[in-house]
Image (tube, helix red, strand yellow):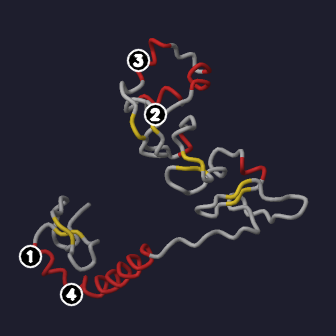
Amino acid sequence: MYCEEESCQNIEPKFRCSGCRYTLYCSEQCQQKDWRQHKKGCMIQRELNKFNDRESQKPKPRPRNTHCTGCNVKFTEDYPSEQDCPHCGYTTCESCACHHSRGTCSCKGSNFGSPYCPRVPKHYHAYSGDYHPDARELSYEGIGTEELVKILEPEVRVCNNCGETKRCLKPGMARLFY
């Protein structure tokens, strides 16, 4: 990063142009010196910022349900859709349904309508929030009663993801499961 004014040698700019929110300057004097050159680019960047702000407010379009969202293969009677997310519209074929990244929909806190908390969190789930494993998962992981006291919160409470009343894992303990 450096000051945008050509004759300035300062490599630590302190503020951005308030118009375009992009160009960096070290002082008001440098900004004023550079205004003639920067003016046209500033106007263009302002318009781009307005456009980007408007676009970010629009709801994302749902993907078409005739093709796989992961690999774009067309569904047929012989090769139907494997999974459809009721919330975001993400649709996968059989191949993408088991793929580590293409088989995950774009919903936050769930995958194809299933909340993350009852599932083992994995690095590809974009997991965040509470998690309450069931007894089968705990026995499969080899976690005994002594370890449960260390990893589960002492009291039951409402899960912030699904609303069930359970004993959730203490913060940072989900890493034991992935």
Percent of width and height locating residue 61: 58, 73
Identify the residue under disc 1: 29
Which secondary structure lies at badge 3? helix
Q: Which of marks 4 and 3 is nearer the N terminus?
A: 4
Which of the two marks, 3 or 1, is nearer to us in this view? 3
Mark 4: amino acid: Arg
Q: Which mark is residue 149?
A: 3
The residue at 60%/53% (across/down) is 113
Of labels 2 and 1, earlier in sequence is: 1
**Rounded to the nearest whole Å, what is the CA distance between mark 4 and mark 3?**
67 Å
Mark 3 and mark 2 in contact (Cβ < 8 Å)?
no
The image shows a total of numbered marks equal to 4
CA gap, disc 2 to disc 3?
Answer: 14 Å
Above or below, 26 against 155 in this view is below
Could you tell me the amino acid type at mark 2? Lys
Q: How far apart are marks 4 and 1 (CA)?
A: 13 Å
Secondary structure, mark 1, is helix
For residue 36, the mark is 4
Name the front one of labels 4 and 3. 3
**In this view, 98 is above or below 57:** above
Q: How far apart are marks 4 and 2 (CA)?
A: 63 Å
Q: Name the residue under label 2.
A: 166
Quadrant for the C terminus, please.
top right
Sequence order check: which comes first, mark 4 or mark 2?
Answer: 4
Whichever of callouts 4 and 1 sits on the residue coming sooner in the sequence is 1
Which residue occupies the extreme left position in the image? 29
Comparing 1 with 51, the one in front is: 51
When asked about the image quadrant of residue 12, the answer is: bottom left
